[in-house]
Amino acid sequence: MKRIIATISTMAIAMIFCLSPMVTKAEAEVENVDAEVVEAAAEITEGDALNIAIEKAGYSQTAVKYTKVWEDTIDGTAVYKAEFYLGPVAFCYHIDKANGEILESHVKN
C-alpha cells in the first residue's frame, strides 16, 4: 500500500512539473533566484526516470521485480539508465535527465 501511495505521489508531482510553467534563467535573475537552482529543480529524479520507463513499457511498478537506475552520459547528454525485469525479460531505457525524454530502449529476452 505504501508503494502504491509513493508511486501515485511521484506521478502527481511529475504531472505538476509538466503542467506548471517553467521559470527561465532571465526570470530567475529578475526575481533574484539563483538560476542554477532553477535548472536543477527542472531535472527529473531517478524515481521519475524509473516510472517513465515502466509506464512506457506498459506495466505498473508492482508488476516488476528488480529495478536499477543509475546516472550516465551519452554523447554529452546527462541521462538515467533505468533497468527492470518482468520475469526473464529485461527492459533498459535511457532517459534524458533534463526533460524525461526516452532516448533509447532495449528489451532482452
Image (cartoon, grey):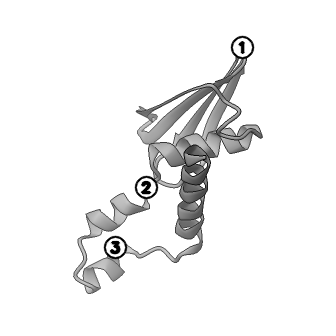
Residue 63 vs residue 73, the one in the foreground = 63
Q: Amino acid at mark 1?
A: Pro
Spatial CA span between label 3 and label 2: 14 Å
Kindly identify the residue that appears in the image at 43 percent across and 55 percent down: 43
Q: Are marks 2 and 1 in contact (CB under 8 Å)?
A: no
Residue 53 vs residue 78, the one in the foreground = 53
Sequence-earlier tag: 2 or 1 = 2
Quarter of the figure that contains the C terminus:
top right
Q: Amino acid at mark 2?
A: Glu
Spatial CA span between label 2 and label 1: 32 Å
Dot 2 lies on which element?
A: loop
Would residue 72 appear left or right of 14 to someone viewing this image? left
Q: Which residue is mark 2?
A: 43
Q: Which residue is mark 3?
A: 25
User: Can you tell which quarter of the image residue 94 is in?
Assistant: top right
Residue 88 is labelled as 1
Kindly identify the residue that appears in the image at 66 percent across and 31 percent down: 105
**Foreground disc of the pair 2, 1:** 1
User: Can you tell which quarter of the image residue 71 is in?
Assistant: top left
Dot 3 lies on which element?
A: helix
Sequence-earlier tag: 3 or 2 = 3
Would residue 107 appear left or right of 23 to someone viewing this image? right
Q: Are marks 3 and 2 in contact (CB under 8 Å)?
A: no
Residue 107 location in percent, x, y? 71, 23
